[in-house]
Image (tube, grey):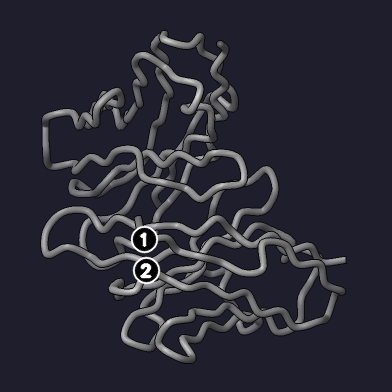
Amino acid sequence: EPEVTQTPSHQVTQMGQEVILRCVPISNHLYFYWYRQILGQKVEFLVSFYNNEISEKSEIFDDQFSVERPDGSNFTLKIRSTKLEDSAMYFCASSYPPRTGANVLTFGAGSRLTVL
Amino acid sequence: AQTVTQSQPEMSVQEAETVTLSCTYDTSESDYYLFWYKQPPSRQMILVIRQEAYKQQNATENRFSVNFQKAAKSFSLKISDSQLGDAAMYFCAYSNYGGSQGNLIFGKGTKLSVKP
């Protein structure tokens, strides 16, 4: 069964450093997403991406964050200058929305980011 | 704003028994979608079951079924004949009908343990 793959599985970085989290969505999917989960808290929507542009973003997704689909297969999340509070599990997801019915997201296993 | 609440942080069930996980949500919308996702340890979230709010019939997928009470805004998951492989974190999620379907709103999750 097709999977969404994410790298790295765990990254440790110093506060203020830039971080890029990578995702390979399912090949025929059209929508791509990033979610995050701070330890002990809910999984939260960050951003959705369609047709090479952001289609929706949450309040969390401020100017420190950016997304890109650089080569038609990868989907990346960049955090420009990491803060302690960016420590979280980051989940990538992708979907192929049906004409009718629910848009079912397929999630990756997550990238754990630890900011020291 | 929509919210999802899972009031049971942890649940335990004996193998082969039945367990019900609770979820309530709040929305002013009349059409929306509800989901249960399962996340085994260190693995990706996978869809267990989904429900369209405009369908009165409760969704079922093999041993998994839901009790969808629209008026009460309740969406519980019943797992019958529990198996060791059912042990995981279970997330209830909500999405709007239409354009922002990829913006899932999650509950905090219920950790299910299955005792042999």
Measuring 12% from the left and 64% from the top, which residue is drawn there?
A99
In the image, A26: left or right of B15?
left
Camera-side residue of B59 and B83: B83
**Labels 1 and 2 touching (C-beta < 8 A):** yes
Q: Quadrant of residue B81?
A: top left
Q: Callout 2 environment at 10 Å: few (<14), some (14 to 19), or many (20+)?
A: many
Asked if residue B26 is positioned above or below residue B74 in the image, the reply reads below
For residue A26, the mark is 2
Label 2 lies in what chain?
A: A
Q: Position of residue A11 (x, y in %)?
A: 75, 67
Question: Please, what is the three-letter code of the amino acid marked with disc 2?
Answer: Ile
Q: Quadrant of the C terminus of chain B?
A: top right
Q: Position of residue B69 (x, y in %)?
A: 24, 26
Asked if residue A64 is positioned above or below residue A9 in the image, the reply reads below
Question: Please, what is the three-letter code of the amino acid marked with disc 1?
Answer: Pro
Measuring 40% from the left and 87% from the top, which residue is drawn there?
A72
Q: Residue furthest front?
A: A1
Asked if residue A46 is positioned above or below residue A55 in the image, the reply reads above
Camera-side residue of A26 and A44: A26
Label 1 lies in what chain?
A: A
Measuring 30% from the left and 55% from the top, which residue is drawn there?
A104
Identify the secondary structure beneath mark 1.
loop
Q: Position of residue A42 (x, y in %)?
A: 57, 47
Identify the secondary structure beneath mark 2.
loop
Q: Callout 1 environment at 10 Å: few (<14), some (14 to 19), or many (20+)?
A: few
Q: Which residue is mark 1?
A: A2
Of callouts 1 and 2, the N-terminal one:
1
Tally of marks: 2
Q: Position of residue A67 (x, y in %)?
A: 52, 82
Asked if residue A7 is positioned above or below residue B3 in the image, the reply reads below
In the image, B64: left or right of A98?
right
- Whole-angstrom CA distance, mark 1 to mark 2, is 6 Å
